[in-house]
Amino acid sequence: MKYRNLSRRHVLRGMLNGGVVAVALPILDCFLNDSGTAYANGARLPVRFGTWFWGLGGNNSILVPKQTGKGYDIPQQLAPIARVREHVNLITNLTAFRDGEPNLCHYSGWIIGRTGKAPKGSAERPGETIDVTIANEISRTTRFRTLTASATGDFRNTVSYENANSPNPPEISPLEFYTRLFGPDFQDPNSPTFTPSPRVMVRRSVLSVVQDEVRSLQKTVGARDRERLDEYFTGLRHLEKQFDQQLTRPEPIAACHAPPKVTMDPQMGVDVEMVKTRHRLLTDLMVMAVACDQTRVFNMSYSNAQANTVRAGYEKPHHTTTHEEPIDAKLGYQPNHAYFASRAIEEWAYFVEAFSKVREGSGTLLDNTLIYANTDHGDARVHSLDGIISFTAGRAGGRVKTGLHIDAKGSGVTRVGYTALRIMGLELPAWGVKSNMTSNPFSEMVA
């Protein structure tokens, strides 16, 4: 049964300390046709596009499978992908062609992968990034044309550019991202009302001020939609409680003594555990924003291109490790670099999993999404621009075959971007410049 009085644009509204808050809804069955594959008016479910970035690639000797196609082997460093393999494509042996330009460490590789052109210098952004190109086609009607977030804690670490002078700065604070998504967009100092502070919003809960609407809504939808709304609101409240915990002073513990003085803000530190925490909170918020159609194009960075994450008990950051750590004679690779690279692969798996857990129509949010993940180098020890790996995740509304390992055989990294552009409906005859220009998508992953 369809409920005609409920629009898919419906939001729950309430007042919180004089400010208006709005809670968007996920796509419910009552908005869809009987098979759950399109809206009731015949319009297709939206297909979204996202990117994910990590620095310094991986250890190819323990990352690249020996087999290609479906059912490929899972090497040691790829282990986290086993739980999401059905949703993911792994593309290996890619090359970013310099076309006579310098190898700008930590820069040339990912820039070529996202713009199709080798930069002349580290200050050059040679055109808009792929997410912007796609957003201009599919994301003009949403609240946010794009959303970008970075777990690095540094707003300079963006992988999204409109042009050379217009970067899209990332959200780096989960709490501020939460406020941006669920509070008013702008606080006017001359307005008679004011935006609730993040602390007040979290302590009071956005959901608490729309409870009457929630109860009314639950009465007007079917059993499956009630279940879906319950999952959605439970997830939102869980995030609010996580933020509340971070803002609450802990109770005294007699056995606890202050450690030696910390020289950097732990909330914005680069320890792998701190980065993991930020990445997961930002991911969960990003998933909610996409599920509510606040945006259809998004970007997430796990680390910056220099990958400056650190590990407790080990004296060197990830980047320095790739230069200075010797190759272990028994293992055949740099073990500490492998540790850092494996943490990145684990977070990529978390990102994919988060989208796969949200039900949408007859499938999941990931089924209606395409995510392109790229890095800056192949062999990080020598900062190579060959042997680069990339991933895609999601089926883009049935347009993508997944679960594949594809050997690119040294062809251009731009083939991944061009494939994504074609899948997202941009009928470009080619993409890229000079040696990086391609008109050859990975046809084996196109449904």
Image: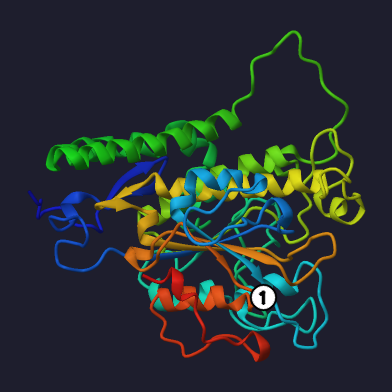
| Along the viewing direction, whichever of 169 and 235 lies nearer the viewer | 235
| Along the viewing direction, whichever of 90 and 31 lies nearer the viewer | 90
| Along the viewing direction, whichever of 176 and 232 lies nearer the viewer | 232
Q: Label 1 crowding class (10 Å Cα cut-off): few <14, some 14-19, many 20+?
A: some
Image colouring: rainbow
Residue 233 in the image: state x and y as whole percent.
34, 38
| Along the viewing direction, whichever of 407 and 299 lies nearer the viewer | 407
Question: In this picture, is 117 found above or below 389?
Answer: below
Residue at 53% across, 54% down? 72
Residue farthest left in this picture: 1
Residue at 30% across, 39% down? 210
Question: In this picture, is 328 found above or below 41?
Answer: above
Location of residue 435 by image quarter: bottom right
Residue 324 in the image: state x and y as whole percent.
92, 53
Q: For mark 1, what is the residue?
A: 410
Q: Amino acid at mark 1?
A: Gly
Q: Is residue 409 visible?
A: yes
Residue 396 in the image: state x and y as whole percent.
38, 65
Q: Can you say which quadrant of the picture contains the C terminus?
A: bottom left
Residue farthest top in this picture: 254
Element assignment for label 1: loop
Residue 42 in the image: state x and y as whole percent.
16, 68
Residue at 9% across, 55% down? 4
